[in-house]
Amino acid sequence: MILLAALFAVMGAASNAVGTAFQRKAASTVAHGGGLRLLIELAHRPAWMIGIGGVVGAALFQALALVNGPISLVQPLFVLELPFALMIAAPLMQRRLPGAAWWAITGVVTGLALVLGSAAPSGVADQASMVRWIPVLAACLGAMGAAVVMARPGRPPLFRAAVLGAASAVGNALTAALLKSATGRFAEGGLIAFLQSWQTYGFALTGVSAILLLENALQAGWLTASQPALTIGDATVSLVLGITLFDERIRTGWWLLPEAVGVALIVWGVLRLSRVVSRVQAAEAGTGRAFVGGGHGDSGPQEEVWGSRGPRVQRIREPKGERPAGEG
């Protein structure tokens, strides 16, 4: 079951990366327009339909992974989405990944293997009592609300991006926990039990909230601030929720040493990959090739942002304040 969960999780990360890459490829072929006009144009492009299929497939693979294994195993494996997206998108956009990107990808994969191999997450429960759910919901929703207050307009852009990215990570982790419980109901009692479960409607609401928080994080500042908070935060909070809600277990003792080394490699790799994406975007924007639609449409210049849950579209603009050294 654990191996099956890991397989589905990796397939989910790869599927979402395919969705990201092919949607970006399709968007780059649209000459003008935005909003509904852009969607109509994209709907006529096979690459965009492949991208949508990748996103749908990712959701199904995640549900299958959560049914078969612990959340503390499944969610960390979705860290692989960022490396997958870069490796798939580079040939699609006729670009080569720089050497720094390959070193970062190696670091992420090695670190993830080291962490999961050392921690050996385990657990078979997919339901938790309301005694456990209530404090978890209060803590997660409270943290998300506090982040919105802390990241109010007027704060430094990097701070806002990091805080909102972390809040989105909490939302993603909570969504995964609710999805695990809801799919468990489906496996036990079928569609009726699934529709009667409060967790079903809970994961829909928290999922939408997490997406909105991510959109605001990407609008607030540089990807190098929001992406690490999102990627690392999702895996960390998921681990805590797995232990708190579903009695999942990881190895401790001397195993903490290789786990710490693995975490350090993942953090380093994600930071490096985020910088690579930001630099590629800045270079494309400078040549006019990063505009969705390939130019200046009715909605103004836009750039595509590679979030960990798929591509996001936003206007190109400089965050207020001083640009971080080494970025762009």
Image: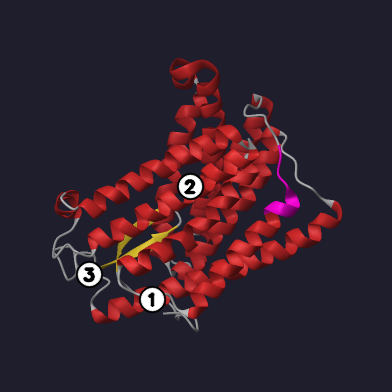
Mark 3 and mark 2 in contact? Answer it, CB < 8 Å: no
Residue 237 forms part of the magenta stretch: no
Q: Quick one: label 2, few (<14), some, or many (20+) residues within 10 Å?
A: many
Contact, mark 2 vs mark 1 (Cβ under 8 Å): no
Question: Mark 1: which amino acid?
Answer: Arg
**For the residues marked 2 and 1, what is the alpha-carbon distance in whole angstroms?**
24 Å
Q: Residue furthest right?
A: 253
Where is residue 225 drawn, in percent x and y? 50, 67
Query: What amino acid does circle 3 point to?
Result: Pro
Tell me which segment is drawn in magenta.
Answer: 116-122
Residues tagged 1 and 3 counted as in contact (Cβ below 8 A)? no
Q: Residue at x 56, y 74 (%)?
A: 103
Q: Which residue is mark 3?
A: 301
The residue where tag 2 is placed is 11
Task: Name which residue lies at 69% across and 56% down.
Answer: 115
- Say which residue label 1 marks: 96
Select label 3 or label 2 by which is in front. Answer: 2
Q: Nearer the viewer, residue 295 or 325?
A: 295
Indicate the secondary structure of the residue bearing disc 2. helix
The kind of residue tagged 2 is: Met
Single out the residue that lies furthest toward the bottom: 325
- Residue 113 visible (yes or no): yes
Q: Marks 1/3: CA distance?
A: 25 Å
Q: Is residue 213 visible?
A: no
Q: Residue at x 67, y 29 (%)?
A: 125
46 on left or right of 73 = left
Left or right, 31 with respect to 275, comes to: left
